[in-house]
Amino acid sequence: MAVTKAPGFINQLRATLGRFAYNASGFNKYGLMHDDVLFETPDVEEAIRRLPQKVVDDRNYRIMRALQYSGLKKYLPREQWTKYEEDVKYLQPYLQEVIKERQEKESWEKLF
Amino acid sequence: MASKFLSTQTVKATRGFAAQAAAKPAATEFSPVPREPVKTTTLSNGIVVTSIETNAPLSRVGIAFKAGSRNEPSGKEGIIHLLRMTSSLSTKQSTQFSLTRVINQAGAALTCTSGREHVLYSVDASRKQIDGVLPKLADAATQQVFKPWELSDNLYKIKLDLAAVQPETQVIELLHKVAFRTGLANSLFCPSHLVGKHTTEVLQSFVAANLRADNAAVVGVGIPHDRLVAYAQSLALKAGQSCSGAPSKVHGGEVRVDTSSSLAYVAVAAPGASLADTKAMVAFALLQRALGAGIPVKYGSGAGSKLNQAVLGAGAVSSLNLNYSDAGLFGFVAAAPASDAGKVVSAATKVLRSASVNESQLSRAKAQLKADLLMAKENTGVLVEELALQALLNRADLLSTVDNVSIADVNAVASRLASAKLTVAAIGNLSNVPFVDEL
């Protein structure tokens, strides 16, 4: 499929910068994913409450393993570091729904 | 906005309503704008649209499906109870919050009622506000989503419903269980061992299989017919196949549940009339009135009721007449203090076995039945449910046939009771309640 050069370049740049930022953050060295380390605002807490049990179990395992390694001041072996391509933003759908519900409620409260 | 539960059809009369095809009533000083006759349209996808334009300020619209507790798959009973509970929760288009607030803002009420063979979502509002809430009714009835966290957050409502069940309701549920065994035996309430066990997938597959266009009816009272037809055409319902369940059969037998109570509640029934047999249905309805369906005068002695006369004030007895599409039950429900329960049940059973009517009792029963049928038309909530049941289950119009019933017809059905196999359900302090083979 012939594509123009410009979108290909932008996407590649995006991926490269994204991967650089992801690896520079360092949480992947403890085997964590992006959504494991999200700052827990009330919205995020409600989204976590709505996760299915299997996802919650996996999340808890990763967090506990990361705490353990952090206490030992060790990183995981390099093969077990979470890769940028393997990262799954599992919380985003639930989080967006929670935020939408909160905004709907606030817009109602403004009127009445 | 309430999630009303339970249409127990306890002493639910075999009601219909007049087609009023005859001359429209003239306007009088008491009813300046008379009701219009009922109008029915069947859409191409199978939805039956029925409406009565009452010319009154209140509108009530319902979406009903021919799917009740008898359609629940085995091992997953209680889905209908969950449907009632989740009628107020999030749908594909609305969140729980917006559903609640829009309906509140309109001063309306959204209700989900269900029976053994139907489930009805209805909304009532003033005529000016009904257009604003009809989209929400469509959401609640056809766009259910059953989010897992909402199910678990609202489970306490199921537990509250179960804790609030009265013994007189419970005895009728037990009667169905022992009489029908499957299908109609399924209770309107979730069995306690299945509370919390219904998943989103189970509920969604039940709704997809059972809440379809070909078994749906859209009914309206106080709304123009064309408006209702347009609304029904806008509903997103898929057509599907109805899988016919096994035909119902009434079995004899008994079930006894001992509880710590000072009273005993006993329901005794024999096979009754199904909705398919209009003649028998009317005859049983008249026999029910003749035997005594409750006491019409508050704090009265029930002198006109054969059952109450027989028990001589030792307890309260009311005749029971239930009609389903392929089976029916006819009998009585008795409540008495534990020590008198045996006397009461034996005396009432004797009346049931030897039931018959003479001319004056029959004319009184006819007057009572006609009054009950007409009274039903006064309440828009009951009227909407009656319209839905007539559309879905082909329930006949009884008002026109009451006068044609002869004394021989009624005594013919009454004589069936003399030799019928009895089904008994009892709950409470049963130390003196006889067993079914002793009756």
Image (cartoon, coloured by chain):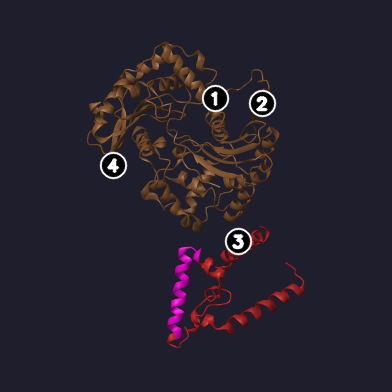
Chain colours: A red, B brown
In the image, the segment drawn in magenta is A49-70
User: Cα distance, mark 4 to mark 1?
Assistant: 38 Å
Q: Which residue is mark 4?
A: B261
Chain ID at mark 1: B
Secondary structure state at the residue bearing disc 1: helix
Left or right of B293? Residue A48 is: right
Chain ID at mark 3: A
Chain ID at mark 2: B
User: Cα distance, mark 3 to mark 4?
Assistant: 47 Å
User: Cα distance, mark 1 to mark 2?
Assistant: 15 Å
Of badges 1 and 3, nearer the viewer stands 1
Which label is found at residue A101? Answer: 3
Q: Nearer the viewer, residue B247 or B404?
A: B404
Q: Magenta segment: does it hold A37?
A: no
User: Cα distance, mark 1 to mark 3?
Assistant: 46 Å
Judge if badges 1 and 2 mark residues of a common chain: yes
Which label is found at residue B34? Answer: 2
